[in-house]
Amino acid sequence: MKHLTTCLVVVSLNLGLASVALADAGEDTFNAKCSVCHGKDGKGKTKMGEKLKAKDLTDAAVQAAVTDEKMEKEITEGIPDKKMPGQKDKLSGDEIKGVVKFVRSLKGK
């Protein structure tokens, strides 16, 4: 039983570290691909963001209005009426998941 508990603790720690690593990688990807419009802080207060009316990704209502799955789809396929290009040919699934994790970390900042 003690061995099982130790294994569960190790697995939990590894999953937590993997989640942090995914969010960190997501921040790098967000800064490279998304910050031109959304800004590094996610508020959308850039010249391009204001021109295109980019959403404030730190806003709790904006965050609540979209599921992770929908956000992944929007990043993958883009949002044509908002002039947001899809990233399916530029980012892997894991990179997109990392961006979603990072965007979620912006809530309330």
Image: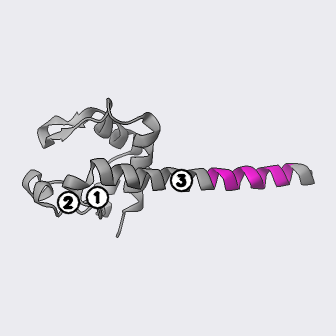
Above or below residue 71? Residue 13 is below
Counting residues from the start of the chain, the first of labels 3 and 2 encountered is 3
Label 1: which secondary element: loop
Find the distance from the CA under tag 1 to the CA under tag 3. 21 Å
Q: Where does label 1 land, which residue?
A: 57
In the image, 49 versus 29, the foreground residue is 29
In the image, 96 versus 81, the foreground residue is 96
Tell me where the magenta segment starts and ends, as one range. Answer: 4-16
Could you classify mark 3 by the number of other residues whose Cα lies within 10 Å: few (under 14), some (14-19), or many (20 or more)? Answer: few
Q: Is residue 13 magenta?
A: yes
**Which quadrant of the rendered structure holds the C terminus?**
bottom left
Could you classify mark 2 by the number of other residues whose Cα lies within 10 Å: few (under 14), some (14-19), or many (20 or more)? Answer: many
Q: Where does label 2 land, which residue?
A: 44
Callout in the foreground (1, 3): 3
- The structure residue drawn at horizontal position 31% and vertical position 50%, both measured from the top left corner, is 32
Circles 1 and 3: CB atoms closer than 8 Å: no
Above or below residue 107? Residue 78 is above
- The structure residue drawn at horizontal position 39% and vertical position 48%, both measured from the top left corner, is 99
The quadrant in which residue 63 appears is bottom left
Instruction: From the top left corner, tell me how far across and down residue 61 is, in percent.
Output: 29, 59
Callout in the foreground (2, 1): 2
Residue 13, disc: none
**What's under tag 2, amino acid-wise?**
Gly
- The overriding secondary structure of the stretch rendered in magenta is helix
Above or below residue 77? Residue 62 is below
Circles 2 and 1: CB atoms closer than 8 Å: yes
In the rendered structure, the answer to whether residue 34 lies left or right of residue 12 reads: left
Find the distance from the CA under tag 3 to the CA under tag 2. 25 Å
